[in-house]
Amino acid sequence: MLNHILQSAISGSRTKPSRPHWKLSLLKYFSLLAALMLSYQSLCAQTTGDAPIDSYIVKEIGNPALLMAKDVDRPVSPASLTKILTCIMAIESGKLDQNVLITKESTLVEPSKAGFREGDRIKLLDLVKAAMVSSSNDAAFAIAIHLSGNVNAFVASMNYKAKVIGMKNSIFTNPAGFDKGIYNGNSSTAGDLMRLTEYSVKNPVFNQVARLEMVAIKEQATGKLYALKTHNKLLNKYPYAVGIKTGYTNRAGGCLIARAIKDNKDILLVMLNARNRWDIASNMFDSAFSDSAPSWPPVVKEKKVYKALSLVKTGHKPKTQVVAALKLSHKAKKQVVVAHKSSHKVKRQLIARLKPGHRSKTQTVAALKSNHKYRKGELVSLKTVKKNKKKATLS
């Protein structure tokens, strides 16, 4: 549709050869911008209608182009998706083989939790598995206390790490994803969470843990086993899904960061406050792999337009180039108008010069006429002299 609009706009401007060249160029640029804006508004109408998701992103790993997106910079509660940051920090600490003492503070958290008891000794790697696979809040708090000594110190490290990764619109208040009471204000965006996930999947340990559907965790002193399983129903629903993390709170709604691999395509999906995560995620992945337009959610086929405008907020380069071109065209128009005015001024000056010349011509003609009269008088006088001379000769 966009190509048709563009071709119609451009070809329409070329069917009027009587217009000056600069007018054709200006009309072409304005037609292009109008077509881009119409396409973007149509896209927004599709993606922001009654879609049961507050915000989302779908993209291929390593490819900057977005396949689908909505409100990517809108701050929302990420719920347990927060644990991805907690776990990647634990993995990068180099302490995965250490035994972690479970403190009372770690056990006094809301479900979901693994059920660790105060005094248990669990390897840090197993706590990462518990936090990622079953979204265990006690595991996330145990990680934070072990690595930084207390939760507040770890939260400070989380926010610093987030900025290093490029998560400019995120604020974390706890390692598990709580978003009320003393932990109110824990927030992120779909764009930031995509950056976090793309950063994390580069780590082979994270990739291995993120794919697990269940895990048995051993308490090091007694040998007691804690059997945990994933809450991610997409792993059973969609055959190409390979993790990564679910999340839910009353404020955040259903959240999901998922990954699917098919036919050498590696697709990541982030959705926040989704009312039917599993079906929607399946449809999104199908659309991303097939490049076909589903009934919902819509695929952004006009990638160049999407990249040019990119939800307006991002201000990508193609839009800037179009605006710059329009400014140049407008500047060219102004130059032509100035030149035209200058030419008109010159014309007026020439006319003004012609008028005195015309008066000079009149004066010249008058002078010639006067001179002609003078010559006629002179001739008459000469004839009289000649006649008198002739009479004198005869006499």
Image (cartoon, grey):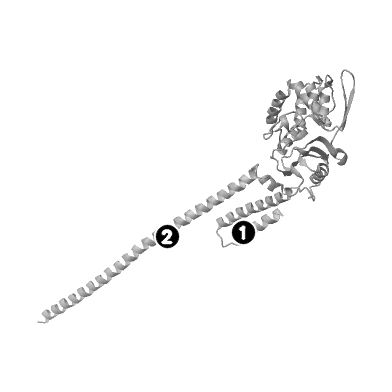
Q: Position of residue 206 (x, y in %)?
A: 80, 29
Residue 247: image quadrant is top right
Mark 2 — residue? 347
- Crowd class of label 2 (few under 14; some 14 to 19; many from 20; radius 10 Å): few
- As drawn, the residue found furthest toward the front would be 181
- Locate residue 5, reporting x and y percent: 68, 56
Q: Is residue 17 left or right of residue 99?
A: left
Q: Could you tell me how far apart the alpha carbons at marks 1 and 2 are, in whole angstroms?
A: 31 Å
Residue on which disc 1 sits = 13
Amino acid residing under circle 2? Lys
Kind of element beneath mark 2? helix
Residue 134: image quadrant is: top right
Badge 1: how crowded within 10 Å, few (<14), some, or many (20+)? some
Residue 204 appears in the figure: no
Of residues 226 and 293, the one drawn nearer to the viewer in this rendering: 226
Q: Is residue 111 left or right of residue 14?
A: right
Vertical relation: 358 (above or below) 144: below
Residue 361 is drawn in which quadrant? bottom left
